[in-house]
Amino acid sequence: MNKKLYLVLSLVLVATLALTACAPKEEAATEEAAPAEETTSEEAAPADTFKVAMLTDLGGLAASEEVKGFSDLGWEAVQRAQTELGAEVTLLEAKELADLEPNLTKMASEGYDVVVGVGYLFTDAMTAVAPQFPDTKFIIVDSVVDQPNVASLTFAEEQGSFLVGAIAAGTSTTGTIGFVGGMESALIEKFEAGYIAGARAINPDIKVLSGYTGSFTDVAAGKELTLTQYGQGADVVYAAAGSCGLGTIEAAQEEGLYAIGVDTNQDGIAPGSVLTSMLKHVEIAVFDAIKSAYEGNFKAGVSVYDLAAGGVGYSPMEYTKDKLPAGLLEKVDGFAQRIINGEIVVPTTVEEANAFVLPE
């Protein structure tokens, strides 16, 4: 009996010690769990992280800093939002037109606060996707999407093109200049119309050769079309055709003639061969829209960036200014002021441009 009783008491004592030993450990674990849970929450993206996604259409980003184009300006704005606003940013480039709608859907469904579509090719896709994500702020460049959560950023390309058209006509020695467009659209027609009207403001008898490559990415096609226009007597060619414009610049170098760049300052790509560049400040417009969303006063609807707003203009011409006829730039800057004052209304169609007469 004594042995059995001793065994029972021993087992009870062991069990009691085990329970006593375990209790503090369990309490400690509970105390540590709460901070650990908070740490995990902090390490994950906070609910108020401001997230911005930018999507390109078929143009994509440029391969190098020297040949930056239209989409690169939008990306500059997004990177500025990262630096100045602390935004979390991402970039998604399309390979084909069929990618545009799924790419928009992907970014919106992943919780990005702002989704930017750079290019008018996003029009149909954003029209379809924006209503599905009413809490997402969408920005489209170069087109209008009539939805309550879409900011449509448009530019007076015809006004900037008017100025470079005047420079082209004032510099030409043959009385013939050229225009190379990308894919035919009302948007690219604005570039062409402004260019023609600006040229006519300087020389009413100017001859303007126009052609389209049907692409924004075919550099070889841009070069071939430009060489054709040079062969027909043009000595200055303006390209509003995305990467095709790089072909225009190559042709200008080879022929010892002039090209005119577009969107960004492309004068330095081929110093002396690029007469000037029509500047389109997409980087300003996109950052303005992103910042408004960040500050809680996002403005849907259409915003127009024209000469008066500093949305368009022409490059400083650091390599070619000294080659211009005396007084030409003063005349061009006078046109700019008259456009801002409303005295000159720049046409947006080729038909109107061909009938343009400079008001007295």
Image (cartoon, helix red, strand yellow):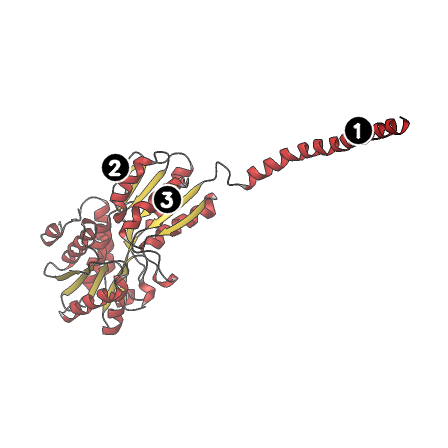
What residue sits right under mark 3 in the picture? 106
Residue plotted at (30% across, 58% down):
315
In which quadrant of the rendered image does the N terminus lie?
A: top right
Alpha carbon separation for disc pair 2 and 1: 74 Å
Residue 122 position, x and y percent, is 28, 46
Residue 220 position, x and y percent, is 24, 67
What residue sits right under mark 1 in the picture? 16
Verify CB contact (< 8 Å) between mark 2 and mark 1: no
Nearer the camera: disc 1 or disc 3: 1
Camera-side residue of 281 and 215: 215
Residue plotted at (48% across, 44% down):
86
Say left or right for 324 vs 52: left
Please say whether residue 300 is visible from this viewpoint.
Answer: no
Secondary structure category for the residue under label 2: loop
Please say whether residue 257 is visible from this viewpoint.
Answer: yes
Residue 196 position, x and y percent, is 15, 56
Camera-side residue of 133 and 354: 133
Say whether disc 1 or disc 3 marks the residue closer to the N-terminus.
1
Query: Could you say which quadrant of the image residue 111 lies in?
Result: top left
Amino acid type of the residue that numbered disc 2 sits on in the rendered structure: Asp
What residue sits right under mark 2 in the picture? 146
Amino acid type of the residue that numbered disc 1 sits on in the rendered structure: Thr
Alpha carbon separation for disc pair 2 and 3: 21 Å
Amino acid type of the residue that numbered disc 3 sits on in the rendered structure: Lys
Nearer the camera: disc 2 or disc 1: 1
